[in-house]
Structure formats: structure tokens, C-alpha cells
Image (cartoon, rainbow, N blue to C red):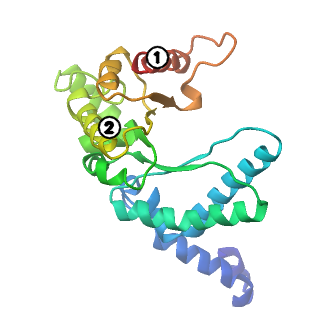
């Protein structure tokens, strides 16, 4: 756009780009980790999540037609209020219904959420009236419980804190059982009071050590999930730090099942 202005191009030739740039600048944030992301983004720009869910359901339809038994679980992230989940589901339900009507077949699916905020953990019983499953985002839940930004705090704050024994360990490597673990336990107990048979999963986006498994057991999580880059795969991968982290995650998952 700057080049077009410098060349003296007609305003109309880059008007769309100017509008787009203004829109991008309007949503710029000082602290995006606590800003326009997760379900908040979808509520303000529903076309984004409608596109994503259409892709999920169209893929599920295609696999079903090929004889594959699929059960998509659509997880709505960063919910902190029941109305966020309710309204997001409302947008997405229309998309799911449209895809299945176009295909003329039925595909079993579920709507759930990721518990990533302390408030979500504390109102989990209410959230479970709309969510058919929970997953715990331990990375964001740790950040928002401690008030740490993981990207900024690990080197500047957490390592000195651990060295000076202000904290017993890095909470992004070993689950904080007294704080984060307690919130998870509250969420599972109150969520199960609403939906006794629903699965509760721990999305392990941190490096997990043996110390994590007692909290997982006390929270009665049914499964643990991890980033693909942190999981051990088939064959014999080299003993890199990421591979060793994946082995610890897998071990914690076995103990929590």
C-alpha cells in the first residue's frame, strides 16, 4: 500500500488493502495472551470458527462415506463464562446442521470446552450444562493462575524463583498441585455432578514429570493429551529433550488412567 501511494496510484486501486490494514490495527493488543483469542475471537468474528467447524464436519462426512467410524469432538477454547460457550455453540450448531443436511447422513459429534481459566474451573458445573466433555489446558491454566506469562517469566522470574526456593519447581514443568491441581480437581468434581459419565482430559502442553501423576489421579482425569512434538512415536527416536519430555507425558498419562 505504501508503494502504491508513493507511485501515486489511484486511491481506488488499494482501497481494500487500506480497509484491511485498518481492521488489523484496530485489534492490535498490548497483551494478546489475555485478549482477543479463543472463543472471544470466534464471538466477534464467527465466520472464522464457522469455517473451521465446516472443515471438521466435511472431513468427518467424507470419512464416514468411506466406511471410517469417526466421532469428531469440537472443543471451544478459553471459555470463562457460560454465555460464551452457549453462544459459540449456537453459531457452530447451525454450521454442523447445514453440513450434515447437505451430505444427507448422520455423524455423531460432541461439543466441549477446554478449561484454561481459573473462573472456568470454578464454574465447571455450570459449564458442563453446555459442554459434553472437558479438556484441561494446563499451560494457560498455569499462566492465568500464577499471573505469569510463560514466554516472558520462565527466564526472568521462574528460574531465579526456583534457585532461591521461592517456588519448589517450575510450574510449567511440574504441575502446581496446590493451586492449578486444586482448580482441576474442583472442575472435575463439579463437572461430574452435572455430567457423571462425561470424559475429562488433561491437555498436557507443559513438560510433565512424575510429580504430576498424583494430581491427575486425584482429579480422576480419564485421559491425557499432549502436543504431537512432545510425544514418543513409533520406531526409535533419538533421545532429545523433546523425546524425553514425551516419555514423561506418556508415563503420567498411564498413571492417571
| Image disc number at residue 8 | none
> Is label 1 in a helix, a strand or a loop?
helix
Left or right of 156 in this view: 7:
right
> Is label 2 in a helix, a strand or a loop?
helix
Check the image and report above or below for 177 versus 238: below
Left or right of 55 in this view: 24:
left
Q: What percent of the width, then of the height, locates residue 16?
A: 67, 81
Q: What percent of the width, then of the height, locates residue 23?
A: 54, 75
Q: What percent of the width, then of the height, locates residue 220?
A: 35, 27
Can residue 4 be seen here? The reply is yes
Left or right of 59 in this view: 184:
left
Quarter of the image with the C terminus in it: top left
Quarter of the image with the N terminus in it: bottom right
**Quarter of the image holding residue 195?**
top left
**Residue with the mark numbered 2:** 188
Using the image as rendered, state which of residue 239 and residue 214 is in the foreground: 214
Left or right of 78 in this view: 211:
left
Do the residues under discs 2 and 1 have CB atoms within 8 angstroms? no
**Residue with the mark numbered 1:** 254
Check the image and report above or below for 20 versus 173: below
Can residue 42 be seen here? The reply is no
Using the image as rendered, state which of residue 107 and residue 62 is in the foreground: 107
| C-alpha distance separating marks 2 and 1 | 18 Å
The residue under the point 43% across, 28% down is: 222
Residue closest to the far right: 66
> Looking at the image, is mark 2 or mark 1 earlier in the sequence?
2
Using the image as rendered, state which of residue 17 and residue 240 is in the foreground: 240
Using the image as rendered, state which of residue 81 and residue 205 is in the foreground: 81
Q: What percent of the width, then of the height, locates residue 110?
A: 54, 49
Check the image and report above or below for 16 versus 116: below
The residue under the point 50% across, 18% down is: 250
Task: Report the number of numbered marks.
Answer: 2
Amino acid at each position: 500500500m505504501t508503494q502504491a501511494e508513493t507511485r501515486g496510484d489511484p486511491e481506488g486501486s488499494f482501497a481494500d488493502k487500506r480497509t484491511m490494514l485498518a481492521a488489523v490495527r484496530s485489534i492490535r493488543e498490548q497483551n494478546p495472551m489475555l485478549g482477543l483469542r479463543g472463543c472471544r475471537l470466534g464471538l466477534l468474528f464467527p465466520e472464522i470458527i464457522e469455517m473451521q467447524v465446516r472443515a471438521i464436519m466435511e472431513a468427518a462426512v467424507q470419512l464416514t462415506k468411506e466406511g471410517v467410524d469417526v466421532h469428531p469432538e469440537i472443543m471451544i477454547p478459553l471459555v470463562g463464562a457460560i454465555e460464551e460457550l452457549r453462544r459459540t455453540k449456537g453459531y457452530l450448531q447451525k454450521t454442523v446442521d447445514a453440513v450434515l443436511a447437505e451430505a444427507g447422513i448422520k455423524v455423531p459429534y460432541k461439543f466441549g470446552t477446554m478449561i484454561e481459566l481459573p473462573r472456568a474451573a470454578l464454574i465447571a458445573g455450570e459449564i458442563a450444562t453446555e459442554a459434553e466433555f472437558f479438556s484441561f489446558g494446563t499451560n494457560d491454566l498455569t499462566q492465568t493462575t500464577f499471573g505469569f506469562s510463560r514466554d516472558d517469566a520462565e527466564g526472568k522470574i521462574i528460574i531465579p524463583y526456583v534457585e532461591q526456593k521461592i517456588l519448589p519447581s517450575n510450574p510449567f514443568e511440574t504441575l502446581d498441585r496446590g493451586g492449578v491441581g486444586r482448580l482441576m480437581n474442583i472442575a472435575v468434581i463439579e463437572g461430574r455432578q452435572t455430567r457423571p459419565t462425561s470424559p475429562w482430559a488433561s491437555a498436557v502442553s507443559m513438560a510433565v514429570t512424575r510429580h504430576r501423576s498424583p494430581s491427575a489421579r486425584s482429579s480422576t482425569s480419564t485421559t491425557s493429551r499432549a502436543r504431537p512434538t512432545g510425544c514418543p512415536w513409533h520406531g526409535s527416536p533419538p533421545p532429545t529433550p523433546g523425546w524425553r519430555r514425551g516419555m514423561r507425558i506418556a508415563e503420567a498419562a498411564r498413571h492417571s488412567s
